[in-house]
Amino acid sequence: MSLTAPPLDPHAPRFRVRPPANWMNDPNGPFRWRGRHHLFYQHNPDAPVHANVHWGHASSPDLVHWEHHPIALAPTPGGPDEAGCWSGCVVDDCGVPTAVYTGVDRDHAGLGTICLARAADPGDATLAEWTPLPTPVVTGPPEGLDVVMFRDPFVFRHDGRRLALVGAGHADGTPSVLLYDCDDLSDWRFAGVLLDGRDPAAAAAFGGRATGWECPQLYATRGGEWVLVVSLWDGHPWTTAYLTGRLDTDLRFTARTGGRLDHGRDFYAPAVLQEPDRALMWGWSWEAREQGEHDWAGVLTAPRVVDVHQDGALRVAPAPELHRLHAAEPFVTAPGRAVLPAAYDLTVSARGHTRVTLLRSASGAEITVCLDPEEGTVTLDRSTWPRKEAEAPTPIVVHVPPHEELTVRVLVDGSLYELFVGDRATVTERIYQRADDTRELSVPPGAAVTGWALVPPTHG
């Protein structure tokens, strides 16, 4: 089934990965196999609420044509994942795609187990069937660390060794990432704490609010630097952050710098695919409206290429394959006013202070993006457009190095808004248009603008 079928709900993204209905959360196990990109994700197939968690599955030959597949992982009655197949990754284990995931049993109190499932037919490019192993390879956290949160394994390679990270939180409120040696996927050995919240660079970049670090991801850049990504948990999903630095031969991570991974309110639990020439990232964008009121909830972001600038800051940009979604001709090429389609890819560049309007209501509320090259700021202002009646969101201000020209790329798909500030920062927000609202672009003279409607891709 194609992911580009027109949604009944106008807020439902058409061009991003999401199940046809019901709940989605974390992306899991982005994986390249036999010429296809595979994405798995946390999914409740029965209702648009977080419960009964399975692994959903979609794949693509080109990052724009996505096809749904049957449920990959389902809870096993009486098994270690009886109450849910939670987040993890997928690796190539001697020619057999293998899911490494968090199993949650009926007595779950924050401590998961680490389970394996193998592709039933490695020769099947769609990886449509999976066979779970009956017993976990790790039954719980290591002794002596007073761990109260333990989940989300991520397997990676370093110096020819296969290693794994697990997200953790400790009873004293300290978050951490635990390290395991798992060269043999059936034999995991605890190798110590890779990093915890007492690290000065982590404390400076993340603050002290998080009590657990979820969904740790670690990837190498083309320049040899390593990037550690974590999702900050404070009793609930909060935000995401990163650190850049070195992974030494003694498996110590020495952080250089870090910060917020995404500056919006609706981005969490990103997953990274390390490819030979790049790293790709997807995140989960949750709903900013009440759960259960609609027949779907949650969507994955556009794929992002992530790297590091010379100053250690994250480099991030939409995957170039997304240009295949562009209509034959742009809908706007010059400043002024234009009607915005429901899904578009818009780029605005400015050398002076510039205010761009994206959405306007009959009552005068607006969604605007303000570029200030001299100050090095981009501001997404939706303060007059509350997400819920009780909220009045403050403007989101992103800081980048000042420059004579500042460029913002805006990807919109239904209610999903993704802003890329140059290649240095992102903002992911969910914005729900009402029936009498107007999708109208307004760009003042002096700016450069190009906008493309997104259309279902054609093969070939």
Image (cartoon, rainbow, N blue to C red):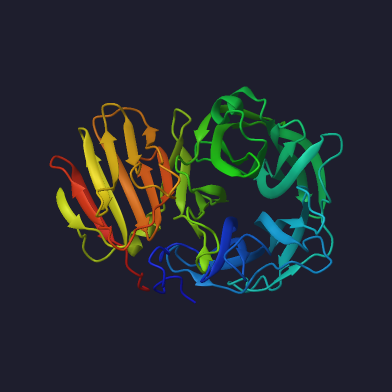
* Percent coordinates x, y for residue 449 in the rendering: 21, 48
Which residue is more in the foreground, 322 or 385? 385
**Location of the C terminus (image quadrant):** bottom left
Name the residue at 53% across, 70% down: 21
Relative to 411, 173 lies left or right: right
Relative to 271, 416 lies left or right: left
Which residue is more in the foreground, 264 or 145? 264
* Percent coordinates x, y for residue 244 in the rendering: 55, 33
Relative to 206, 264 lies left or right: left
Which residue is more in the foreground, 307 or 445? 445
Task: Indicate whether 121 appears above or below 158.
Answer: below
Q: Let me know if residue 225 appears in the view.
A: no
Name the residue at 44% across, 64% down: 62
How many numbered discs? Answer: 0
Which residue is more in the foreground, 438 or 140? 438
* Residue sitting farthest toward the top: 200
Task: Indicate whether 38 appears above or below 399.
Answer: below
Q: Let me know if residue 250 appears in the view.
A: yes
* Residue sitting farthest toward the right: 143
Quarter assignment of residue 82? bottom right
* Percent coordinates x, y for residue 13 in the rendering: 42, 63
Quarter assignment of residue 16? bottom left
Task: Indicate whether 182 appears above or below 52.
Answer: above
* Percent coordinates x, y for residue 313 in the rendering: 46, 32
